[in-house]
Image (cartoon, helix red, strand yellow):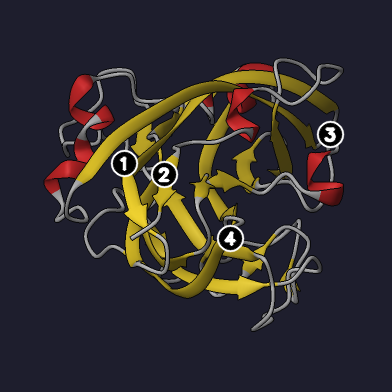
Amino acid sequence: MSVQYLRRCAVPVTSVAMATGLMLIGSPANAAPNTTSFKNACQADSLLTVHKVADTSMNVDAPESVVAGETFTYRIQPGGTFFPDRDSGASTTNISRLKVDYEIPANTTFVSAEVVPGSGINLDGVEPSVLRVGEDGNPDAAGNILRLSGGNETIANGPSSSIDSEGGIRAPKLQQNLDGTVNDNGDSWYQLPAVDVTVTAGDDGVITPQVRTSGNAANYNADENYYTFLPKAQFFGVQWAPSRCTPRDDQDAPLNAGAGPLATISVVSD
């Protein structure tokens, strides 16, 4: 599996329509949409170990301000991505075990989280869901992580992990654009669904939704990384390339803006 194949697995949608797409699916009231663009540095392990850097984005719809003690909802969703038909002799098959971890924001009390129906595009496999998990990826009512996955089937950091079998949320090889039209290059576009997170605001200050980068999740090529997935291709047999990504400009760089606040919600006194 080639460098180009793995790189293309994380190319973002750049159209205005997708950047504002969350507003079209019943967004939370009084929300102010915000798109944060950043780079992911990823390591994929297959026949060779491949290091890649790819542009990506995260979209958040959240109130600009809330009152201390107020219960409110914000929405968060990754930008769209694609994988190619073929590359360097390899025929791509699909990407599965897709997983994104978000941190429960400081200065909040968690209430609930749920996938927004109809917000995922060109996906199959296990139905996407949100679980509250601990650092080990196991369900935990006191955990600080919200995991978007298919039944917690991941490549690592969970009870149902595998690096050589399909599972969880899958992006099949449809060779379609996000609007359902045929892609002239044979690329297969998909987008993971949005998640509505409901919390109760704490004291005066701010609330900042962000992806998981606490503890080991901040390290390059760690099982705890916020974004992990399992590409599959055919090249002299089946090839698997478990991939782990963190928000940084390259493998040796510090965390970038993708690890910071994806929105800033002011908390004010009543």
Q: Is residue 89 visible?
A: no
Examine the image and state in which quarter residue 50 appears: top right
Q: At 67% from the left edge and 72% from the top edge, which residue is drawn?
A: 133
Question: Distance between the Cα atoms at labels 3 and 1?
Answer: 33 Å
Identify residue for label 3.
Answer: 220
Q: Earlier in the sequence, mark 2 or mark 4?
A: 4
Q: Position of residue 134 (x, y in %)?
A: 74, 71
Question: Distance between the Cα atoms at labels 3 and 4?
Answer: 22 Å
Q: Is residue 87 above or below residue 19?
A: above
Q: Earlier in the sequence, mark 3 or mark 1?
A: 1
Q: Amino acid at mark 1?
A: Glu
Question: Distance between the Cα atoms at labels 3 and 2?
Answer: 29 Å
Q: Position of residue 241 (x, y in %)?
A: 72, 41
Question: Distance between the Cα atoms at labels 4 and 1?
Answer: 18 Å
Q: Is residue 250 visible?
A: yes
The answer to the question of whether label 1 and label 2 lie on touching residues, with beta carbons closer than 8 A, is yes
Q: Quadrant of the N terminus?
A: top right
In the image, 224 versus 134, the foreground residue is 134
Q: Nearer the viewer, mark 4 or mark 1?
A: 1
Q: Is residue 234 above or below residue 102?
A: above
Q: Nearer the viewer, mark 3 or mark 4?
A: 4
Specify the label residue 64 is tagged with.
Answer: 1
Q: Amino acid at mark 4?
A: Ile
Identify residue for label 4.
Answer: 104
Identify residue for label 2.
Answer: 265
Q: Amino acid at mark 2?
A: Ile
Q: Position of residue 141 (x, y in %)?
A: 64, 84
The answer to the question of whether label 2 and label 4 lie on touching residues, with beta carbons closer than 8 A, is no
